[in-house]
Image (cartoon, coloured by chain):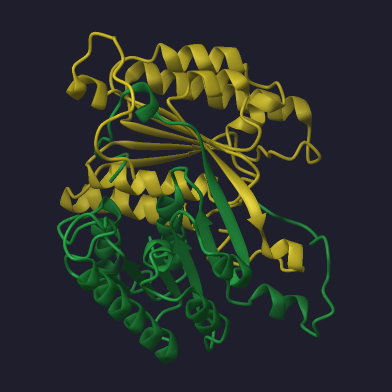
Chain colours: A green, B yellow
Amino acid sequence: MPKGQPLNVPDDGLTTRQRRNRPLVMVHTGPGKGKSTAAFGLALRGWNQGWRIGVFQFVKSAKWRIGEQTVLERLGALHEETGEGGPVDWHKMGSGWSWSRKQGDAEDHAAAAAEGWAEIKRCLAAETYDLLVLDEFTYPIKWGWVSAEEVASELAARPGRQHVVITGRDADPALLEVADLVTEMTKIKHPMDAGQKGQKGIEW
Amino acid sequence: MPKGQPLNVPDDGLTTRQRRNRPLVMVHTGPGKGKSTAAFGLALRGWNQGWRIGVFQFVKSAKWRIGEQTVLERLGALHEETGEGGPVDWHKMGSGWSWSRKQGDAEDHAAAAAEGWAEIKRCLAAETYDLLVLDEFTYPIKWGWVSAEEVASELAARPGRQHVVITGRDADPALLEVADLVTEMTKIKHPMDAGQKGQKGIEW
């Protein structure tokens, strides 16, 4: 965790406090594990700060439900009950939409992805959330269903104080350019290499 | 997320189900962000499965309290109240122990770290938890306060079905050897590079 003095102090006319409180665009990319898991870990931190959390999950399948959804929705309900933490909305983008182009009809997927992005734009304009998690959002961009340049310019121009974290492999250079923080997760070793399949609690 | 058939099927006499359910040692290392955050994200998944979660945090300072501690302890309390999820214990290893050797007395730190490791060994032998998060545990190993070889052999010989995730930079080769899954978090871009300091909700 970074601490102490930053390496460079930019000549941007901001005070340290203003610079510190600048909202961030974060990208978790690369072929390794932990991209989404770290994003949901960030959502935990944000919830604890009382932030309004919006998850936009570009899901493998509408039936797919990961443990994080259950827990974050439970934390959102806890906020409603007791006022602890912040509210949580979990959006599955495009019911039945899948990142696998092998299933279903590509045009439907493209339309569902475009509608998902339109919803994200509406939320950004309305400043609905303090932290937006755009989970696996690199894929509809990669497949040309959503324009990387438009995403980058919308993010750069977003109003107020909205943190955004985007996960997925092969993040577009336009995303990396607009991001304040980019982490690449690299696979050094994985149980699949030793013939082990995924298991509950670890992979979902 | 891995799916489908593994690349290799080892000749280890295990069925796919047995192999799938094998407990894992996971290491999150490298200089990038997301090592601890992804580990606590895994703890969310495990909690949702009803697992007993034990966090052993080799903390920067006893006063340091990260958002994940508040939330995971809250989830543990929720388990007590309603039976949802699993129980959570959060151990700060060595009150006042710090990963910064610049502060305080190195011998005290070494003794506190050794005691922390002794507690982890007791929990492993007693099979107290289903998932153990050893947060920033690479540092006491790196500084010679805990033997990497002993950690590796204890982990390899641990009884029952205990998942273990270890976070921190510069993981010892003995840890990587015993691990089933190793992810390296690489820093591509960080706000510190642009003169921005850490902020609440993002860094803690």
Q: Nearer the viewer, residue B197 or B7?
A: B7
The answer to whether residue A24 is above or below residue A183 is: below
Q: Position of residue A84 (x, y in %)?
A: 35, 69
Residue for point 60% across, 42% down: B59
Q: Nearer the viewer, residue A162 or B95?
A: A162
Residue for point 34% across, 55% down: B74
Q: Position of residue B189 (x, y in %)?
A: 66, 59
For the question of whether residue A80 can be seen, the reply is no
Q: Nearer the viewer, residue B99 or B202?
A: B202
The answer to whether residue B153 is above or below residue A86 is: above
For the question of whether residue A12 can be seen, the reply is yes
How many numbered discs sit on the rendered protein? 0
The answer to whether residue B164 is above or below residue A68 is: above
Residue for point 37% across, 80% down: A120
Residue A130 as seen in the image, left or right of residue B103: left
The quarter of the displayed image where residue B123 is located: top left
The quarter of the displayed image where residue B98 is located: top right
Q: Position of residue B135 (x, y in %)?
A: 53, 38
Q: Position of residue B137 (x, y in %)?
A: 57, 32
Residue B71 as seen in the image, left or right of residue A63: right
Quarter of the image for the C terminus of chain B: give it. bottom right
Residue for point 25% across, 27% down: B20
Residue A20 as seen in the image, left or right of residue A150: right
